[in-house]
Amino acid sequence: MSSQYRALAELLQASTPVWRLTRLSDGALGQVEQVACTDGPVGLICAGMAGKKPPCIAQTDAGETLVERLTNEKTLLICGGGHVSVPVSRLGKLLGYRVLVVDDRPEFADPARFPDADEVGCMDFEKLSGLDWETLSDLSVVIVTRGHVADLVCLRETLRHETAYVGMIGSHKKNAAVFDKLRAEGVTEAQLARVHAPIGLPIGAETPEEIAVCIAAEWIADRRTSANSQFTAGMLDALAAGCGGVMATVVRKTGSAPRGVGARLLVQANGHVLGTIGGGLAEREVIDRARAMLDAPRTELCHIDMNNGEAGKSGLICGGSVDVLFEVVD
């Protein structure tokens, strides 16, 4: 399979993170290097990334290169099983997360209370250190325990690990007290700066369901800077099964295009489409191009301007443009 997509799908289905480097320069367009690892990208890329987080374009000796860290799973750890946690768990599952809930009270750590969660555990929060944190892929942590003592314990442990998002519920005064305690223990300002506290976007939420929405909105927004990209389960199944087709990947975005770098759709050999790059007329143009390439296979980088043409005339989009890489999947 060209572009190593079958091997990639098999690795991701085995829950192995993969760094994927795709050349975008003339003469090397579509050449791919991918490495299964958990710590960082291939050495030759590090300097070219210049502090950027993948997915991003890096400048290397080989020219422009799309750098992605790909995973098959994203995890939501909810510390606390109270009234806010229930709708947070429900939203997490709806958004495609593996949801874990932990509380130290049996009546709140009840699987029947969290039918959407993948795992519900009853344990002292001090025992969070016993979790296998390294296996919690693309981790977001929501701390919504019953009080600041438990919040402190959960946050202390969370800050020892890399997370895509961490937020803690509570008033400014309570959170400041927790932060001061952690500073006294040697936690750095850089570590504390990762914490969203009070948790959630300020939308005036009052009910548990509204609070859950503001929390979910914040972690979605913050994860845009996460080092992970995802494939849909259906796309991975098709690739692992050796389907043919054309893969379309957003490699550059400007303006208010709906999806960012790394967004993908796969047009299979039978014309069926898996995934999305954001919908609308731009996606329709990408799908049409990909279907045409089924009869004339080639690697191609296309610029799609959503300010002009039929997309701009429709009034249905806000503008922007994307560069899309088309790759043949044999």
Image (tube, grey):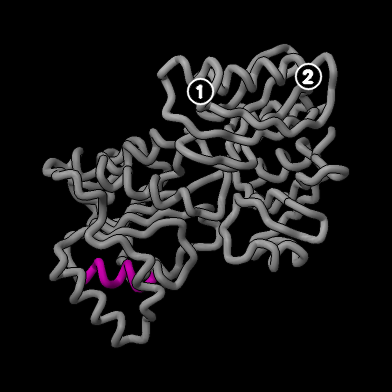
Label 1's element? loop
Mark drawn on residue 45: none
At x 32% / y 44%, what residue is drawn?
A: 216
Q: On the image, numbered disc 1 is attached to which residue?
A: 279
Mark drawn on residue 293: 2
- Residue toward you, 304 or 5: 304
- Whether residue 240 is visible here, answered yes or no, is no
Q: Is residue 143 magenta?
A: no
Picture layout, residue 187 above or below residue 171: below
- Residue toward you, 144 or 107: 144
Q: Name the side, left or right, on which 211 lies relative to 262.
A: left
First-in-chain label (1 vs 2): 1
At x 54% / y 45%, what residue is drawn?
A: 73
Given the image, on which type of amino acid does mark 2 rest? Met
Magenta residue span: 149-157
Write down the quadrant of residue 37 in the picture: bottom right
Q: Quadrant of the C terminus?
A: top right
**Residue 26 percent across, percent down from the top left:** 83, 43
- Whether residue 52 is visible here, answered yes or no, is yes
Picture layout, residue 40 above or below residue 247: below
- Residue toward you, 250 or 172: 250
